[in-house]
């Protein structure tokens, strides 16, 4: 017997796309905001979509196109931005942005027991929220990229937690870049402003410009974007 499953929708358009995906085109045109899909439709969709995503991931691997983070990270940014929207304002973003801003300035960073506790709580919150995001409907390609992204992200966060437990923070540049992307940029604005006593609007403008440049280059490291020198020398 199959467990009952639920699915969340971020927009009316997502709900319409869901109906198209399950072949109920006639219901798309009579849909209203109160409509909720039947459990059997959700179960069937999840089963079918899971098989499709699995086959596509296997195909990409067989074509030697496994989404290694450095090569394909720009493909994940839509999913990461959706994640930022769904977790905007969360304390975990603020705590981790403060920690990472300090870490970028000082590689030999040491934390007291209270700072360590808060930082570990924030790091450990991310895997849970990344999986919660999986409960929302996504178009096929977006789901494929998102699932490949969390296959990279979850181990990176666990490696970071292990490092902090051992009183170190010696992450690879690849892991650090991924984690910097997953933290909400608005939290970094606040952290940089607080850390360096800078003008908030100016910091926001510089970040937006750097994000735009990163999109165009596709390979830009977020570690370079968030380096404090970028802001201190320009304000």
Image (cartoon, rainbow, N blue to C red):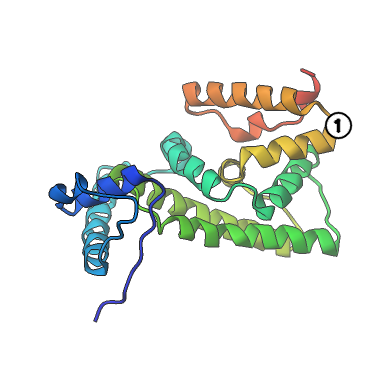
203 to the left or right of 79: right
Q: Is residue 94 visible?
A: yes
x then y, percent, for residue 165: 72, 65
Number of residues whose C-alpha sits closer than 10 Å to that of mark 1, classed few (under 14), some (14–19) or many (20 or more) = few
Report the quarter where the C terminus lies: top right
x then y, percent, for residue 204: 68, 27
211 to the left or right of 147: right
Q: Is residue 135 above or below residue 224?
A: below
Secondary structure, mark 1, is loop
User: Which residue occupies the foreground of this view, 73 or 44?
Assistant: 44
Tag count in the figure?
1
x then y, percent, for residue 84: 55, 45
x then y, percent, for residue 79: 44, 43
Q: Is residue 230 visible?
A: no
Residue 46's quadrant in the figure? Answer: bottom left
Q: Residue at x 61, y 61 (%)?
A: 125
Pointer 1 residue: 197
User: Which residue occupies the foreground of this view, 194 or 38?
Assistant: 38
Q: Residue at x 27, y 53 (%)?
A: 53
206 to the left or right of 39: right
Report the quarter where the N terminus lies: bottom left
User: Which residue occupies the foreground of this view, 101 or 90?
Assistant: 90
- Outermost residue on the top side: it is 234
Q: Residue at x 41, y 57 (%)?
A: 134
């Amino acid at each position: 017997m199959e467990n009952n499953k639920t699915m969340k929708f971020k927009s009316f358009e997502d709900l319409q796309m869901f109906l198209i995906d399950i072949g109920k085109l006639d219901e798309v045109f009579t849909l209203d905001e109160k409509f909720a899909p039947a459990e059997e439709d959700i179960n069937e969709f999840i089963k079918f979509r899971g098989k499709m995503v699995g086959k596509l991931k296997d195909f990409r691997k067989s074509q030697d196109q496994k989404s290694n983070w450095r090569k394909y990270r720009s493909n994940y940014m839509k999913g990461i931005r959706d994640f930022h929207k769904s977790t905007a304002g969360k304390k975990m973003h603020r705590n981790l942005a403060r920690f990472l801003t300090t870490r970028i300035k000082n590689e030999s960073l040491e934390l007291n027991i209270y700072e360590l506790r808060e930082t570990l709580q924030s790091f450990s919150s991310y895997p849970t929220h990344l999986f919660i995001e999986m409960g929302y409907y996504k178009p096929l390609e977006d789901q494929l990229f998102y699932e490949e992204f969390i296959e990279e992200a979850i181990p990176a966060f666990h490696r970071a937690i292990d490092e902090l437990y051992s009183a170190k923070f010696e992450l690879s540049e690849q892991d650090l870049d991924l984690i910097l992307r997953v933290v909400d940029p608005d939290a970094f604005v606040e952290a940089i402003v607080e850390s360096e006593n800078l003008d908030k609007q100016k910091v926001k403008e510089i970040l937006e410009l750097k994000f735009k440049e990163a999109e165009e280059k596709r390979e830009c490291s977020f570690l370079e974007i968030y380096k404090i020198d970028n802001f201190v020398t320009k304000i």
